[in-house]
Image (cartoon, rainbow, N blue to C red):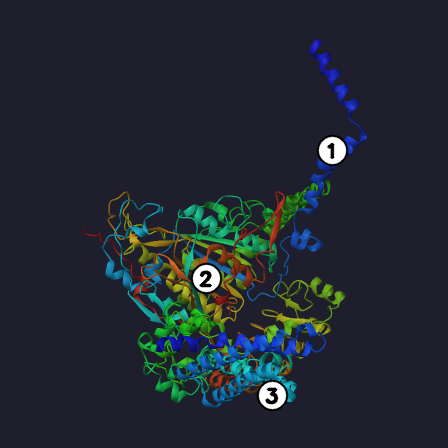
Amino acid sequence: MEAFAELLGRLHPLIVHLPIGILLLGVFLYFFSRRTPALQPAVPVTLFWGAVTAVFACVAGYFLKLSGGYEEQALALHQNTGIATAVLAVLAWLAVRNGENVAWIGKLRTGIISLTALFLFVAGHFGGNLTHGEDFLTQPVMALLGKEAPAQQAAAPKITDINKAVVYADLVEPIFKQKCWQCHNAKKIKGELRMDEIELFLKGGKHGKVLVPGHADQSELVKRLLLPEEDDHHMPPKGKTQLTDEEVALVQWWIANGKADFKAVVASVPADEKIKPFLAKYGGGSSAADSGPDLEQQVLAGKVSAGDASLIKKLTAQNVLVLPVANESNFLAVNTVNAAEFSDAQADWLTGLSDQIVWLKLGDTKVSDQALKSVARLKNLTRLSLEHTTVSDAGVGSLKDLHQLQNLNLVGTKVSDQSVEALGQLKQLRTLYLWQTQFTPAGVEKLRKLLPHTQVDFGGYDLPKLTSDTLIYKDKPKTT
Amino acid sequence: MLSKSLLEELREETLRSDTRRHFLKQCTTGLGMMAMSSLAGCWSPSKNDPVAVANPMAARFPHFPGKAKSVIYIHCAGSPSQLELFDYKPELIKVSGKECPPSFLEGKTFAFIRGVPKMLGPQGQFAQRGQSGAYVSDYLPQFQSVVDNVSFLKAMHTDQFNHAPAQLFMHTGSARLGRPSMGSWVTYGLGTENQNLPGFVVLASGGKAPDAGKSVWGSGFLPSVYQGVQCRTEGDPVLYLSDPDGVSRNLKKKTIDAISKVNEQHYQEFHDPETVARISQYEMAFKMQMSVPEIMDVSKEPQHILDMYGVDPAQGSFARNILLSRRLVEKGVRFVQLFDWGWDSHGTDSGGSLEVGLRNKCRQVDKAMTALLLDLKQRGMLDEVLVVWGGEFGRTPMAENREGRANPYMGRDHHTEAFTVWLAGGGVKEGFSWGETDPMGYSGISGRTHVHDLQATILHCLGFDHEKLTYEFQGRPFRLTDVHGKVIREILA
């Protein structure tokens, strides 16, 4: 009997659609029958069955309520409006059937029927809120208005630096929010488990705790996720949006390696093979300097007019390579690999292409500090190589206006600690090469502090002499 | 007499029936088409670029801005064992010496394994290295220090289980002869920056050429100007480049000018692009006479660099070639292809064994390839140079039993299902690993990467859509990745 009651309860969401349809039909027929009297006989029959199914739906709803898991206030609203609808439906039927016999009902006939329709909508809406969540209907409208609903925002978190992201709040919670909270929230506490509040989440549900810190495979939550989808205990239930493999791996990683710590940051949790590709999507697993927006991509995504063709010809005649960075791009890469005699005077020509030049290689040429004044006017410059030139501290000062500069190669130049301040202003730099300069380790350290997001490479690498470098392995046949 | 008159009559009849229309029709499919194809059939990335026709090696630009500008491809010919170097399989230790399960053998073909071989545990001592925690064994003690600069592809797989076809497959995208190599495709697409050096240089070491021969750096159906220029590591880097006794450089110049003039006339007459290639090759050879010996002379490197690479400048070696590759890309060479022979550890002799031969091969390259990454880094070049390291296939988790008998040394057979390749610099992630093999290391279970995927990724790093870098040949466009290949976006920075 109990099982039957539960089954009936679960059928409630199905059954309610009968009175909705039939009662609406009844209401329509009632109003149309005024013009088309031929329809009149149909009205009481329709309303009768509408009333019967409405009562039946109420009974089923009551059984569903017994199985629990719904927030009281919202449930009460739906229940009361639902019962009211059923009562009104019975009255409406009586009104059309016995209108002539009971005078006062007959007079109110139209009012009762209109009210039935109104309550039908109200009760239906509250019911919908219970099953799908309050923002279910408003979400697409809000999105249309440009106001993203909060739940959607959470689904696509904007993570700028994955290593500093909080594992739970930034990565795991959005998954739960999207795929679990619908049933495990304050309004619909399925299995007596609430996941939307950390304390209640930790407390667990009907079957106890769901998280075992450090042991993903022992955690009820993970067990449920991993059960075959057909299994009754599988979560999310069959038919609901499932977690992707990647999301499951992330939850497992948080519980196992992250000890289900709600405050742990990504960098502090040991990454395993399974999770690396996921973190990689956010740029994790690589050095800190690689994260953050790619300025170069932004520059190259922009549009500029084509560079002065005669100027390009003039430079090319001097063996300077002047090439677009790609097909259908007006941005230019300039390279002096074949023009060792390239000088300050020629560098001045480059200013005629100040919008177009994004990559500039002047290594191993005759340019000096004077040329950097021209270079400083190339406002879209993202990569600049000056290695093995006579560039010194005096010239580096002029680079501060290059706001797009990402890579700066000063290897083998005369720059020294004097340039710390000037270089320290180039906050947007991703890489800075200072090998074989007059910089001191202390100066480099200072610069590194000023440029926390830059890979400042001071070079001078050396590999230890290991005995294995020269050890020659000798023949030692396998004994069989 | 009779037969002659009959023949003459036939000829006259044929001539009479040949109308003006026939002649024109023949022209469009015959002579005309020949001229058309030689005019329009080639140079597709630069067809409208007069500079490219005059100088097919002129620097060009790719489809989209590429991170990498040049490539150093280190190929360990013979294929090093991933199970000894990078792909740590502790489970394999437990089953070492036990018979191979039938599921590993059913429906499979191996180069030498017959019957039921025994499983063979990893021979190296593994530990996680660097911040990224990549596994590297004690076979490569120096390389352990730079894993945070590298992206590993742990679940590579290929179609070919014999050296020559597998090498061809790796470098030309096809296991059969006739396709252009990767370096040829890249120089065809991008030209080269330094006009005094070849754009595609090949350096071979290890005493033997790769099994697939020179076709692995051939230009296939691309104009032959794009084929790799092999530089020898001992004696003259390029044979017959230096002036013979009694011939001065001036005389040589005059000779080449005269030959070029004749070739130019020939080109005016026949429009054969191969003539242009020939002209530019003569001119390049002349320029290379000066620039190549200089760049190939590693003794010009300071002692601390030689020490770092572990190079004795007097000896040709894999390590010296690695140092040379840096010198070449530094001067604007587009593609440097290194081959080193002797990585084929079957276990049939001590040189080809895991416990002796492979350790010695690793020692020869370990320090140099580690130094290469650090050296490129300190010069600010690693951002723009893509370094690729790998073999042509992998090795089996089973010990080889040639013709059913156990080999005298420890060895593994050729394996197509799983091997490791690493990439560094030029647009790939640092300290990253993609793909995973099963606990036995037999096959990739996630992030499986095919040879064509690797090729697509290398082209992508250079700014090419691998599906669009094509060449019209035999009536259809060809490309490096055939009809396959997917860029491995996961490893891109």
> Is residue B447 visible to the viewer in this orientation of the structure?
yes
Task: Please name the residue shown 64% across and 52% down the image.
Answer: B56
What's the CA distance linking mark 2 and mark 3? 107 Å
> Is residue A390 visible to the viewer in this orientation of the structure?
no
Residue B47 screen position, x and y as percent: 69, 52
Q: Secondary structure at mark 2?
A: helix
Q: Nearer the viewer, mark 2 or mark 1?
A: 1
Mark 1: few/some/many CA within 10 Å (<14, 14-19, 20+): few
Residue A329 screen position, x and y as percent: 68, 66
Point out the residue furthest to the front here.
Answer: A101
Residue A289 screen position, x and y as percent: 50, 78
Q: Which residue is mark 1?
A: B26
Q: From this view, report whether residue A107 is shown above or below residue B340.
A: below
Q: Mark 3 and mark 1, same subunit?
A: no
Q: Can you tell which mark lies on residue A102?
A: 3
Q: Which residue is mark 2?
A: B323
Chain ID at mark 1: B
Name the residue nearer the viewer: B449 or B344.
Answer: B449
Q: Secondary structure at mark 3?
A: loop
Q: From this view, report whether residue A88 is shown above or below residue B412.
A: below
Query: Do callouts 3 and 1 mark residues in contact (Cβ within 8 Å)?
Result: no
Q: Quadrant of residue B68?
A: bottom right
- Specify the amino acid type for callout 3: Val
- Specify the amino acid type for callout 1: Gln
What's the CA distance linking mark 3 and mark 1? 104 Å
Q: Mark 2 and mark 1, same subunit?
A: yes
- Specify the amino acid type for callout 2: Leu
Name the residue nearer the viewer: B181 or A308.
Answer: B181
Q: Nearer the viewer, mark 2 or mark 3?
A: 3
